[in-house]
Image: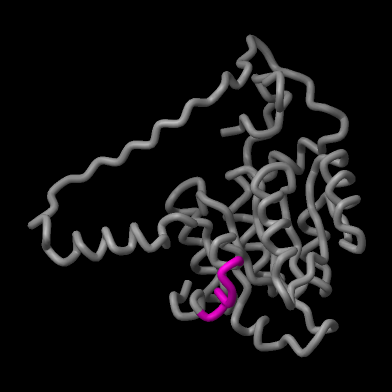
Amino acid sequence: MNSLSRRSFLKTSTLAVAGVALSARSWGGIVGANGDIRVAVCGLNGRGKNHLSSLAKLKGVRIAALCDVDSVVLGKTAAAHPGAETFSDIRELLASPEIDAITVATPNHWHSLMGIWACQAGKDVYVEKPVSHNVWEGRQLVAAAKKYNRVIQAGTQIRSGEGLREAVAWVQSGALGKITASRGFCYKRRDSIGKTSGPQPVPPTINYDLWSGPAPLVPPHRNNPKNGPVHYDWH
């Protein structure tokens, strides 16, 4: 992952705020309406909504495809984005030559593998945090970016904010002396996940095999009144 390449494709303030990566190679190829960067958004029920709204504001970018394993979510999103091709299986999407880049807003366990597959298919990638389930998995994604000469950006949005950059520079200047330890806190109230005493049925609209992907194929043991047994509370 190359910092210079990353800077080169952050062409607009909207793109920078959204944290959506598009390669310098792709931007350089724009020659008009028919030369739009064709982006697919994968995972549409959470952060994917933000990806879609941010991409829609960018000149030279076209939302070419949508991917989700929940047919209801996919259908509802497709209705708001006419012309975008729809997929439930990421493998079929990546096989399409009509896609230049993808954004990944799926559950965490899919992030690295989906990014690696995208690199192998010749697509550039923006992937939500966390990039990987563990360090080894993340290094394979980095290796894939180098091997296939693709651009990958991770969604560490606020870490690139001016205030934090100034704070880091101040610490690095030696103003605090030698740093021997640091602690970070993040308190956010969350509602109950609806933990249950036994496995819960998966809604028929969800392809749970695809949803699980590289994770163990085990039934959910939760049932949030708002999100149901699958969405969101996989955290």
Residue 163 magenta-drawn?
Answer: no
Q: Residue at x 87, y 44 (%)?
A: 76
Q: Closest to the observer: 162 or 19?
A: 162
Q: Residue at x 49, y 57 (%)?
A: 157
Q: Residue at x 72, y 75 (%)?
A: 59
Residue 46 image position (x, y, % from top left) = 67, 43
Q: Closest to the observer: 208 or 163?
A: 163
Quadrant assignment for the C terminus:
top right
Q: Quadrant of residue 94?
A: bottom right
How many numbered marks, from 0 up?
0
Q: Quadrant of residue 162?
A: bottom left
Residue 6 image position (x, y, % from top left) = 50, 74
Q: Residue at x 76, y 43 (%)?
A: 210
Q: Quadrant of residue 98?
A: bottom right
Please identify the residue farthest to the left as the structure is shown.
Answer: 177
> How is the protein colored in the picture?
one colour
Residue 36 image position (x, y, % from top left) = 78, 79
Q: Which residues are magenta?
A: 8-14
In the picture provided, is 94 more to the left or to the right than 197? right
Q: Examine the rendered structure and indicate whether residue 73 appears above or below residue 1.
A: above
Please identify the residue farthest to the top as the structure is shown.
Answer: 197
In the picture provided, is 126 more to the left or to the right than 181? right
Residue 30 image position (x, y, % from top left) = 73, 86
Q: Examine the rendered structure and indicate whether residue 88 appears above or below residue 165.
A: above
In the picture provided, is 178 more to the left or to the right than 71? left
